[in-house]
Amino acid sequence: MKLAILFGGASYEHEISIVSAITVKGKLESKFDLSFIFCDQDHKFYLIDGAKMKAITFSRGEHKKMGELFITNGGFEQRGFFGSKKLEMPILNLIHGGDGEDGSIASLMDFFHIPFIGPRKEASMLSFDKHYTKWLAASLGVKTLPYEILHKEDKRVVATAYPFIVKPARLGSSIGVSIVREASELDYALDVAFEFDSVVLIEPFINGVKEYNLAGFSARGEITYSIVEEPQKADFLDFEKKYLDFSRSGSVEHAAVSDALVTQLRESFAKIYLPLFEGALIRCDFFEIEGEVYLNEINPIPGSMANYLFEDFSGGVQKLLGSLPDKKAIRVNYDYIHSISQAKGK
Amino acid sequence: MKLAILFGGASYEHEISIVSAITVKGKLESKFDLSFIFCDQDHKFYLIDGAKMKAITFSRGEHKKMGELFITNGGFEQRGFFGSKKLEMPILNLIHGGDGEDGSIASLMDFFHIPFIGPRKEASMLSFDKHYTKWLAASLGVKTLPYEILHKEDKRVVATAYPFIVKPARLGSSIGVSIVREASELDYALDVAFEFDSVVLIEPFINGVKEYNLAGFSARGEITYSIVEEPQKADFLDFEKKYLDFSRSGSVEHAAVSDALVTQLRESFAKIYLPLFEGALIRCDFFEIEGEVYLNEINPIPGSMANYLFEDFSGGVQKLLGSLPDKKAIRVNYDYIHSISQAKGK
């Protein structure tokens, strides 16, 4: 089975995506005939030799010596002196953060009729911006923490009680996130967050809150759930720790949780996933507060595809590939133009 | 000043876009050096000879004899035996409905670093889906009518009192819209709407409600507003009437409204427009109910760019072109990969 892993992107998570792609390669190469497509920060695409799938290939710029690819209707194309060769295979979108998760790659794949694993454009936009995720969750009856929104040009007045978390609205991987414990820390936290986005989200920080991650995907009308993970944490993962986290390939223990909680987590996951996220394998990160489940974040392209949470990761990817959503084709018949031309001809 | 009008698209509003492009050509050609890029229903692009900008060119398929264009970094490219020629000029996105207004074209233009007039991807997504527009308006404190959402697979139970309007969530130009006056009409109206979308929006129909349209754009830190139009209406415009509406190029009367109402309309417009719609010329359609302004719809690419509402339409387009939003460039420095490689080397 052929599959091309698309990674890189013009994003603060560019390096994380490289690490993620290398990890997923290790998990899938025995079952798939893999190709590797690197998107650089200027949005040039390169076909990467599997043997060169190492972080230093990219940090040294060696990818530039490999074949450039061009996106065209039906697939990526390699051009040569003697004509062009098309890569006709589905894509696994593994570009984290900007480009990959903001709807750009989804739009490109859909527009050029390239089948892909990953969130579709609406799903991308609603999960990429944490503010929109709040709207989505509220409309689905999924609980989230209360929040405030602050724009760069707003007065820096926060109503939420200390301690609280300050997050750029549109970034993942904990980039630009701070815990603010007292007033003196606020300005710095906001300066950091506004470095990355013009909109920040403020939420209460709940000391020692229980966190549970659950991944899954839908194929053939049925959701395959991962095990429930209780992530290790300091207060929260900073970028460097998360970076290492993206290279995870081992397996983790099923969290010691009650069946009732697993049911609650799965129900919340299903509400969010269906039908918006069809075609994607996503991870939802939840809090548990007094027996109730709260959505923290949706990761529509989780680090290394959360492979370590699935018993049969490569089998799951195969299943998902066989069940990608179709985009409804719209045929144009020019009825109105014909009728108007006829009316004019009278 | 060079400008390329992009029109067509795989959309139910494909034909409307052709009419719109022909109209806008007439309004801009004396001031601009125009090019015309047609996107067909298969997402192939063609460079159209200005003299052939007639509806029958497309309904007869004559565009296929003209030069095919390919989208590449920095602009559309025409390929020939003796190399390729790049069209380096800004684009006016005039693809109504799917592709143009759903964020696809915005994603493509941004991804390939092509400057364009039109809604950016988030603005597109939030205005293309009438359900998301409700979320947006609520978050901005702009009033809208109460509504219900019905999914294709839901039981057909509606709580809204008769008469009400049934609309596909993601279509413009009144396609698939019905007024339901009594229970016996419900099934048919829903069948029609579900032909076009899996999600429909239901809103009360208010007989004789006052409607006002206001268009505008922001350039150099200031919004240029159009005149306020009171659109002619039957109950509402059906597709055929709206189709003719898209070819409007005359000018209309400023509606006889109080200064206070104009101020209210402009305030609501500004709340919606800034900063989400920067780069676009949009039209907002409002209701007035008991002296209060309600947002009905956002048209992020209004028919024929609402040219007939502006005193100096071509001057406005020039101003807007000079004030297009920049996409923040993200530079990747491979710091983490370097630090990890070094740590491993120790």
Image (spheres, coloured by chain):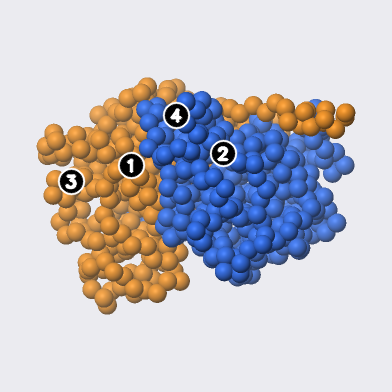
Chain colours: A blue, B orange
CA–CA distance between discs 1 and 4? 27 Å
Kind of element beneath mark 3: strand
Amino acid under disc 2: Leu
Amino acid under disc 3: Glu
Give the label on residue A183, or none: 4
Residue A317 in view in this figure: no
Amino acid under disc 1: Leu
CA–CA distance between discs 2 and 1? 22 Å
Kind of element beneath mark 4: helix
The reply to whether discs 3 and 2 touch (Cβ–Cβ < 8 Å) is no
B308 vs A95, nearest the viewer: A95
Give the label on residue A35, or none: none
- How far across and how far down the image is residue A235, in percent? 60, 41
Amino acid under disc 4: Ala
Quadrant (top left, top right, bottom left, bottom right) of the C terminus of chain A:
bottom left
Give the label on residue A171, or none: 2
Foreground label between 1 and 4 = 4
